[in-house]
Amino acid sequence: MIELIRPATADAERPYVTRLRSTASSFDPHDAVLVDGDAEGGLFSGAFGIVAIEGIPPGQLEGEVVLVDPARRRIERLLRAESTTNTLLVTERCDQLCVMCSQPPKKTHIDRFDLLERACLLAPEGMLIGISGGEPTLYKERLLTLMERTLSIRADLSFHVLTNGQHFTAADIQRLGAPDYRRVSWGIPLYSTEPALHDLLVGKDGAFAQLEEGLSYLAIAGARIELRTVVMNDNVGGLPALAGYVSSRLRFVEAWSIMQLEHVGFAKNRWPALFFDHSGRFGPIAEALDRALLHGVRAQLFNFPRCTVPAAYRSLAIASISDWKRKFAPACSDCREQTKCSGFFEWHPDEEARVTVRPL
């Protein structure tokens, strides 16, 4: 697991964002340049003063965009130059209470949009930046403004936003139809064709109806949409019907991601009730994939180790888990397909991972 929070001391009074450099070449006023360092850490100097970062060789921080928090004596590694899985957490508030939520929401919100916008402007060239929460569109105006300002300056960047899709209105259609929004995709969860079941799983009455309305506005705007469905005991039997719904009513989506459960957050203590072991009964998932693919919907499997998926569907199981929270079981070292595989979440029980793995 890659630690995204590192201890650090700084002489600034307030949090700030900076990009770490080993030399002053192509220097930007928001860069901090390495002054001294060894295997135990590095000392960087920039316009905001000195920051000493502990516990990591400076070479591993080259080009990274970090948030320096002097009061908390730490840095957050916001955008890592060598990673393809960078995600900015814009809020921990949410208006849903999903039974499987991997990051249970908080009631408070700390506004960091200005700092995160600066981070985006310092991002490495060509980066896809993830936006997550909580629910980012609870602060829709701030969110859209951040992306619009960034995209107007950085034509090389793009965004992927995880959202419940329930806060868009007809008034957003023209704005979201602007050319720059072709570089924004929206990852939106849909768990069932049965409104009552979807609402139950997300812990919010009326959520399904609001989602359908939100999807219609996004469709009219020509937005890029990735549907996401987490597989659980409660909804797995309805996956074929959901595939039919997506194929007939939501053909405009770019992709449908069927996702395995994450052993963290609310799901951790509900694991026996929620977790569906697809390795023993793949039938409902296979039928859903067949229906979607037959009708031209690009379906894919997230968080499914490839060796647990029947050979006919293995190519759909992509390496979806972010590098900072991914692990492999010891037996995976002998697998020829490890580089294509999602592996496991760092917090997945080791014993389950060990029993599950069948190297290919």
Image (spheres, rainbow, N blue to C red):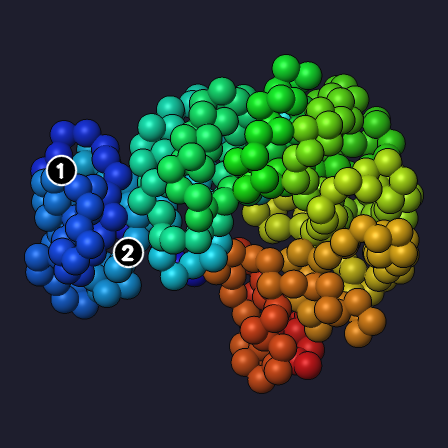
Secondary element at image label 2: loop
Q: Residues within 10 Å of mark 1 (few under 14, many from 20)?
A: many
Q: Earlier in the sequence, mark 2 or mark 1?
A: 1
Left or right side of 270 for 93? left
Q: Which residue is mark 2?
A: 63
- Location of the N terminus by quadrant is bottom left
Expressed as whole percent of the image width and height from the top left, the position of residue 122 reads 31, 44
Helix, strand or loop at mark 1: loop
Q: Amino acid at mark 2?
A: Gly
Query: Could you say where residue 214 lies in the image, as x and y percent from the top left?
Result: 71, 25
Would you place residue 284 above or below residue 309 in this image? above
Task: Please report the residue visible at 49 percent of the width from the left and 20 percent of the height from the top.
Answer: 141
The amino acid type, in three-letter code, at marker 1 is: Phe
| Residue 319 seen in render | yes
Q: Which residue is mark 1?
A: 48
x, y percentage for residue 208? Answer: 78, 26
Residue 213 left/right relative to 127 = right
Per the model, the C-alpha gap separating discs 2 and 1 is 17 Å
Q: Position of residue 307 (x, y in %)?
A: 71, 73
Residue at the spot 65% in from the left edge and 63% down from the top edge: 318
Residue drawn at x 55%, y 25% is: 137
